[in-house]
Amino acid sequence: MPVLVASDLDRTLIYSAAALALTMPDARAPRLLCVEVHESRPLSYMTETAAQGLTDLADAAVFVPATTRTRKQYLRINLPGPAPAYAICANGGHLLVDGVSDPDWHRRVTERLAGECAPLAEVQEHLLRTADPVWVRKHRVAEDLFAYLVVERELLPGDWVKELGAWAENLGWTVSLQGRKVYAVPKPLTKSAAVHEVARRTGADLVLGAGDSLLDADLLLAVDRGWRPAHGELAETAWTAPAITALPERGVLAGERIVREFLRTARGTAGGAP
């Protein structure tokens, strides 16, 4: 049976320049590979060591990117190694098979959201009404599934995020603060549901995972073994679970460590090790 590796991307495997956390002396900084260009500018990076490890992982496991990004945002990433046969976008709203969204999966997701959650329009209206233009840079709706704000983090009142979370809770939505983005996402819209579907299709009997944010918690609770870096929402709240290892590394070196753990565990399983 194959090993399935489902991993968040941003601030887990790939990093913007602002998130690299290169705290070592310049001469000891790792060599970086650019894996995303947006509007003709480099945007996201991995270490070269992590990139080689991700390439090697294709021989030991089924690698499934699991991201909150929209399909368009995901498809501009150029990860090293073979193109993943499966990818999870829009926090589970789209299951890509060879780069194309599975229509049956998307229909099932949207039907569940319609039956269990307040409509997106109601949440979007609340965001527009309560967010202060002083600290909001952009309002966005992603794939007609969820909404997010791009904010000036240093000006964002912490109480506003807490109050938004309490308000959203009663409507079947959850709130997550990731870097400069505040996400409002329906509770049933999860990466874990899509991961379970990929595991079913591939026959995987071991699922590994990694993530750094509140929106990754359900993914990490669904895997057999998982890792989280020493940065992000989960680290800030000291979130943990029995099968999850909290790593000491931060920034792009955490991404390198996560790939190393994926590869070591997948190869150990393939070789019959416990």
Image: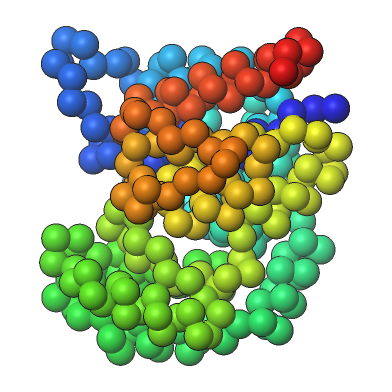
Q: Residue at x 65, y 25 (%)?
A: 82
**Total tally of numbered discs in the picture:** 0
Residue 233 visible in the snapshot:
yes
Q: Nearer the viewer, residue 122 or 177?
A: 177
Is residue 41 at least partly visible in the picture?
A: no
The quarter of the picture where residue 266 lies is top right
Residue 1, given in percent of the width and then of the height, sits at 85, 27
Residue 264 is drawn in which quadrant? top right
Q: Residue furthest front?
A: 242
Query: From the viewer's perspective, is 156 left or right of 161?
Result: left
Figure colour scheme: rainbow
Quarter assignment of residue 165: bottom left
Measured along the vertical axis of the image, is residue 122 above or below residue 75? below
Decide which of 61, 38 is in the foreground and name it: 61
At x 45% / y 81%, what residue is drawn?
A: 168
| Residue closer to the observer: 199 or 230 | 230
Q: Is residue 59 above or below residue 73?
A: above
Rendering coords of residue 49 (x, y %): 43, 14
At a point 61% along the width and 66% down the height, the residue shown is 189
- Image quadrant where one finds the C terminus: top right
- Up-down relation of residue 96 to residue 5 (above or below): below
| Relative side of 238 to 172, left or right | left
Q: Residue at x 71, y 84 (%)?
A: 115
Picture coordinates of residue 26, whole percent (x, y): 15, 16
Q: Is residue 35 left or right of residue 22?
A: right
Measured as percent of width and height from the top left, residue 176 is found at: 40, 63
